[in-house]
Image (spheres, rainbow, N blue to C red):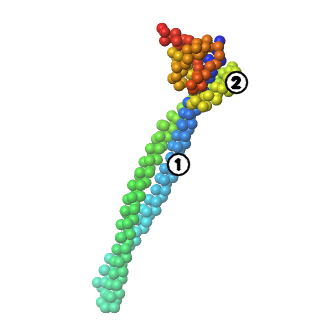
Amino acid sequence: MPTQIDLLAELQRVDQALSEKTRIVEEGRARVAELEETLRVKTAAAAAAKQELSTLEARQRDLEDRLGAIKSKRKDRHMRITRIRNDKELGLAKRELDLLKEEEGTVETELLDVLEKVEAATAAHTAVVDEVGSVEAAMKTEAEELKKTIGQLGGEIESDRGRREALQSSVDSDLRRRYEMIFSRRGGLAVVEIRAGICQGCHMNIPPQLFNQIQRNEQVIPCPNCQRILHWRPERAEQANG
């Protein structure tokens, strides 16, 4: 029949497993949430980049149409000017041509600026679309694998909790409270083995008389140095001697 210390040692194994599995689940959920948020942000950025590119392309088309109309108008005015014989009308026609040429230059300058912006916006849109693709790929691989692991560990955690409740009910309440206090203060290590007279928690030598008492396994004895509960496993000593 297992002793109280044996039960505590088993309780600690369950608690450590619960702690580790819970940590993995929490980190997994955080990573999935991070990927989901990254995908949301990148998707929004891609939509914004697409809208900006569409606006610039529309402006480009408008300027190109406007420039084409100006050039067509200038060509028409050139043809008409050759037929003008009146000096006053000729002067007005030349002034109109000068104004059209000036307008053409202004539109061409703006069009060149827009073309540069379209090129930059196209590159930015392509880059963010590629980023969205990368995150979507991670969602299909990493996130799906994490969700699978989380689901699997969720079942194991429920099983471990059931095992823990059963162990708790078998351990003296005062001893259990003592164990839980040490467990929380000592980084999840409340029960440690003693091997060759050495505490495996702090690696300090245990006085021979105390070691003999521990081997009798009749009472709960803490390490004089680290205060962890010492656990003696005769079968391990037999293996070492063998």
Precedes in sequence: disc 2 or disc 1: 1
Residue 174 — which label?
A: 2
CA gap between label 2 and label 1 equals 51 Å
Quarter residue 84 falls in:
bottom left
CB-based contact (under 8 Å), mark 2 and mark 1? no
Q: Residues within 10 Å of mark 2 (few under 14, many from 20)?
A: few
- Residue 125 at x, y percent in the picture: 43, 54
Looking at the rendered image, the disc whose residue lies closer to the viewer, 2 or 1, is 2
- Residue 56 at x, y percent in the picture: 43, 63
Amino acid beneath label 2: Asp
| Quarter of the image that includes the N terminus | top right
| Res 157 visible | no
- Residue 227 at x, y percent in the picture: 60, 25
For this view, does 121 lie left or right of residue 200? left
| Res 172 visible | yes
- Residue 20 at x, y percent in the picture: 55, 30
Residue at 39% x, 65% y is 114
Residue identified by numbered label 1: 40
Q: Nearer the viewer, residue 74 or 12?
A: 12
Residue at 41% x, 51% y is 127
Residue 126 — which label?
A: none
Q: Residues within 10 Å of mark 1 (few under 14, many from 20)?
A: some
Mark 1 lies on a secondary structure that is helix
Residue at 57% x, 36% y is 26
In the figure, 84 relative to 190: above or below?
A: below
Quarter residue 154 falls in:
top right
Mark 2 lies on a secondary structure that is helix
In the figure, 157 relative to 90: above or below?
A: above
Q: Nearer the viewer, residue 151 or 219?
A: 219
Amino acid beneath label 1: Arg
